[in-house]
Amino acid sequence: MCPDANPTTKMIDKFCITGGSGHSAFWRRDTSGVETLELSKLLVGLRKVSSFIGRNLGDIVWSGMDFRYGIALDPSLVMGSYPVPSGKTDIAVGITARLSFEKTQWSDRLKEIAQSMSRDYPPPYAYKFNHYIDLCEKVYLDCISNHNVMGLYTEAARLWEISEKANQFLQPPTVTQLLHIWWKMAADIGGEKYKEDYVDRTVGSMTGKVIDLTEIYGPPIALLNSIVPQLISECPKIPGVTERADFRLTLYLSIWPQLLEYIKFWPTDRSDPFLIPESFRKEMEKEDKEKEAVRTTVVSFADQIESAIRKKNRDFTEDVRSNVANTEEVVQIVGNDIVMRAKDKIDKPLMHKLQQTIRAAAQRRTTYNRGLTSGKIDRRKLYRAKTTGKAFLMKKNEFELPNDIVLIVDATGSMADPNKWDQSQVIIQTLFSALRRYNKNARLFAYNEVKEKCRLTEIYSSGFFFTVLPHGKTASGEAIIATALKLKSKNKRPFIIHITDGASNWGCGVKEAIAFCKKKKISLLTLGIGCGPAAKTSLKDEYGKLAQFIDHTDELPHLFGCQLRDSMLG
Amino acid sequence: MPNSPSNRSPLGIPQTDPFFYVTSEMAGMIGKIRRISERHPVNILVTGRQGCGKSSLVRQYAAIYECPLATFQVGVLSEPGQLFGEYALEEGRTRYKQFLFPQALQTPNCVIHLEEINRPENPKALNMLFSILSDDRQVWMDELGTLKVADGVVFFATLNEGDDYTGTEMLDPALRDRFYTLLMDYLPPNVEKEILLKKSKVTVAQADDIISMVNQLRSMPELSVEVSTRTTLMIGEMVAVGASLHDAIVVSLQAGKEELESILLSLHFEKDYRQTGETTYLRLTRTAVDTEQSAHAQQNGQRDLKGANLHVP
């Protein structure tokens, strides 16, 4: 920050955050002055930006954080001052956008094919060829981003990368400098610069001699610019992604032989393995070490960044395993936050009855506001009548359940029948709404199975109900234990209500969950809804007295009330 | 003395809002309610989403028929009888202090507005309303005796009900049964624009921008943001005093930081709204505020606080 002090008063009137203005100032609101929090918030913002580009991009993380598939961003650009200034954020967004477009346009596939072709070339030419393909793709990706506001960010990223790279240019003419000059022209957001002839506007050179590069770079740049119209206009019109990639590769290859004639004797860059002098090699090693240091810094608080972002998507598997006897049967269980908004299915008459039932089981807590000048007469403060006159009180009754209730709903394949799922949604939303009236800490979860993982999803947040797709096998044991592990220790006595339509058929089994809940003094109740006779028998075998069955929603208030009273008395 | 506090009635007649719009059907219904109220007291329940004009409808009814209006917050009631009065100490003696409600009940043609009737702290607090709202139209209280509802009194009850109020305490069916129900909803864009122009004094171009942006926000249900007519007017007033549309939205939408970020991202990437800026921190003094205000006005080509036209780029 650059403080601006008033010379007369010697007070600082203004703090500016260095880093320049940027377009991201429009939308960036969730910021922090703390390094780990700010990096995690910025990462969340970058993930939101990438969601406007496409799906299946994988995880977007800072380099050094764990991920299997996705995009790893270099955090060194944004580290330093916090909140990250808009100018730097713009560059980070631009880099994220381009890497996201790489995924959606299958640039990796194109580069793989190009690399396999380059094996036939002599090594110096192969290096140049791969460099050329890489830059061509950057030009294409920046051009497609220019169709909307994303182009502002890729422009910021492009200009930054070019200026960073310019510090490392060798004595011109070089292939790298040529390609970067072309990149700047071809991907310009105005979309017209590539039509102009190249004119060298640099002043001086490293050796002090004035070299006019117009004649040297002009012809190859004109050649490169000849493919730009097709990149901007024709390629995006092709419907298939593989066809688009093939089109681009053909286009790049069409001018390569002619381009090679211009550049075959030019050096590329400092990383060119055939041209590196010792001094450059040492500088590069030093730079790599600095980058590694930054990466190490990020790795050291990667966990903090992760936990700041992903509060829900924990992997509970090891925790569950350490709390059961039957460890071999434990299946993987993870948190999930991919949800859809649920329609309002609350049955209001049923909710009214449930509220009355729950209120009857709730504990009344009376709070008194004493020492008032009007209200109800407070017999304990009548002595004040002659002095301050504050001899009145206001009484307020609040009804609260003595337990913190958690509902966990079976959303596995057996519930996939639309009528069944609809009915269960009615019961869940109605019951939860009634419970929430008397227990502010009530939470609602659903569990299902996707790709051999049991997923636990919180489906109520900030006043809205969400839903998941019923799918997969039923790992009730793991789900109940993971839910119990999510409960905060300062809770009142927890009470888990498990709503299901059938017995567990996967994982460690419900007996482990019952034992775990008993150990942790968590009350567990299972409500079977829409169960057939066989399912009822299985549930009775699994849960014993802890299972109750509801065949019709009208039975719910009475049944639930009895269970609530019994469990609270017990 | 005619103007002494004890002689002045606390029940006032509100002023007519010249820019209050309802559907023709609603207007017809208002007339019919008036005619019924001339025969006996009427109960009307006005429901709708927040900021759609429920309380404004009640005020406008009282204004056009020149009736006194009394508004009571039912949401704060925690005990039966709390609407009517409470005990207080005067000159060393306890005395029952009557509130405005009994007076309003006994004022002919009074419009009594019960706000958020579905949210009392204690449901029993509404018990005494049952006999007042039923055909009895009277209630007995030890402290006040029999209270009869005067002729022509209309009870308007308002509550928020909609998709987003799934957790709201449901109105007791026995109570709800005593009301006619009027459903209110948001206004169409052209009507909203007219209200915006007249009430917040924005220009036509600004009103178009605001309505366009508000409709875009409403068309994005995944953002879970309610932009009511009230919010639209708030945005308009901000813009009218020189704020940019972006700044007006940021302060007018009731959303947390993360949600606001998602909303602005959608407007930025899907609808191409843009604004560059950089973050600075200023020492908050009058001079700093005036300087920023002038800078914003210069940017937006608007009048500054003192009314002088600044350079329009």
Image (cartoon, coloured by chain):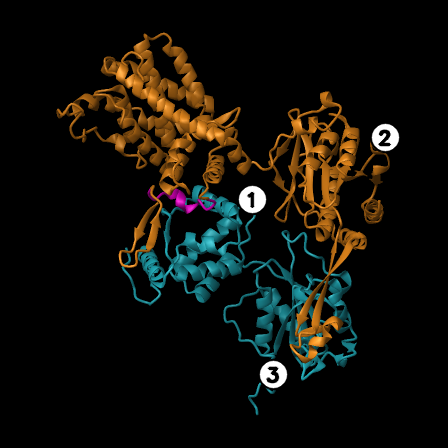
Chain colours: A orange, B cyan
**In the image, what residue occupies the spot 60% across and 34% down?**
A313
Q: In terms of sequence position, does the residue under pointer 1 or pointer 3 come before the other?
A: 3
Instruction: Name the subunit of mark 2.
Output: A
Which type of secondary structure does the marked residue at label 2 adopt?
Answer: helix
Looking at the figure, which quarter contains the N terminus of chain A? top left
- At label 1, counting other C-alpha atoms closer than 10 Å, the crowd grade (few under 14, some 14-19, many 20 or more) is few
Q: In the rendered structure, does residue A30 fall within the stretch colored magenta?
A: yes
Residue topped by disc 2: A541
- At label 3, counting other C-alpha atoms closer than 10 Å, the crowd grade (few under 14, some 14-19, many 20 or more) is few
- Between circles 3 and 2, the one closer to the viewer is 2
Q: In the displayed structure, would residue A407 be above or below residue A508? A: below
From which residue to which does the magenta span run? A20-31
Residue topped by disc 1: B222
- Between circles 1 and 3, the one closer to the viewer is 3
Q: Amino acid at mark 3?
A: Ser
Instruction: Name the subunit of mark 3.
Output: B
**In the image, what residue occupies the spot 43% across and 27% down?**
A295
Q: Measuring from the top left, give residue A253's x and y in whole percent.
A: 34, 16
- For the residues labelled 1 and 2, the Cα–Cα distance comes to 43 Å
Residue topped by disc 3: B9
**In the image, what residue occupies the spot 79% across and 53% down?**
A353
Q: Quadrant of residue A530?
A: top right
Looking at the figure, which quarter contains the C terminus of chain A? top right
Nearer-the-camera pick, B31 or B122: B122
Q: Is residue B83 visible?
A: no
Nearer-the-camera pick, A234 or A410: A410
Q: In the displayed structure, would residue A94 be above or below residue A391? A: above
Q: Measuring from the top left, give residue B116's x and y in whole percent.
A: 65, 63
* Left or right position of A223 against A344: left
- For the residues labelled 1 and 3, the Cα–Cα distance comes to 50 Å
Nearer-the-camera pick, B139 or B194: B139
Q: Measuring from the top left, give residue A195's x and y in whole percent.
A: 25, 31
